[in-house]
Image (spheres, grey):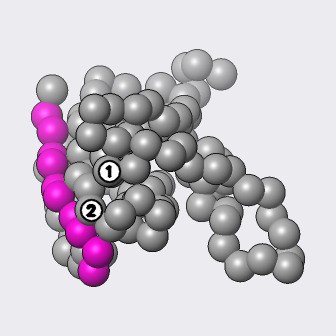
Amino acid sequence: METLRMPFAHGYGSAAIRRTVRHVLATWQLTDLAGDALVVISELVQNAVQHAGGRGELVLTRRREGVLVEVFDESSAAPSVRAPDPRRIGGRGLLIVAAVTSAWGTRTSQAGKVVWAELAMAAVCATAA
């Protein structure tokens, strides 16, 4: 199993994270997942920066069926999914995560929580259907 670990903090440098993730996915021969992975990572890291103290760690793990994205942060508060509301800006990130992943969720850890998402390769999704 191959893993990428990237700590981040407030002012995290999203461009550097995006470049690194693209490079790692290409190395793992998973470029088909890059677009969805970058959307998911952007949403989860941004949530951690905005709502959970601003520090954390992104962990990307290659699996036989795709990629596991995990974002660790220092808050034990679970993220909340909000329905779209034209009177409110934002709050749709987790709906996007749910739409492009095969599964996602939250679990607590000793230091806070982990929000995770699984991205499956298209061939795996087609066989599961």
| Rendered image: mark on residue 55 | 2
Residue at the extreme top of the image, as rendered: 128
Q: Secondary structure at mark 2?
A: loop
In the figure, 85 relative to 87: above or below?
above
Query: To which residue does mark 1 refer?
Result: 74
| Rendered image: mark on residue 46 | none
Q: Main secondary structure of the magenta part?
A: strand
Query: Considering depth in this image, is 83 or 122 the residue closer to the camera?
Result: 83
Q: Quadrant of residue 19?
A: bottom left
Cα distance in 3D space between marks 1 and 2: 7 Å
The residue at the point 26 percent across, 62 percent down is: 55
Query: Considering depth in this image, is 129 or 67 the residue closer to the camera?
Result: 67
Q: Secondary structure at mark 1?
A: loop
Q: Please say if the residues under marks 1 and 2 sit with CB atoms less than 8 Å apart.
A: yes
Tell me the amino acid under the disc marked 2: Arg
Tell me the amino acid under the disc marked 1: Glu
Q: Which residues are magenta?
A: 2-11
**Residue 8 colored in magenta in the image:** yes
Query: Considering depth in this image, is 37 or 93 the residue closer to the camera?
Result: 93
In the rendering, at what x and y percent does residue 40 appear? 46, 55
Horizontal side of residue 59 vs 36, given as left or right = left
The residue at the point 24 percent across, 45 percent down is: 59
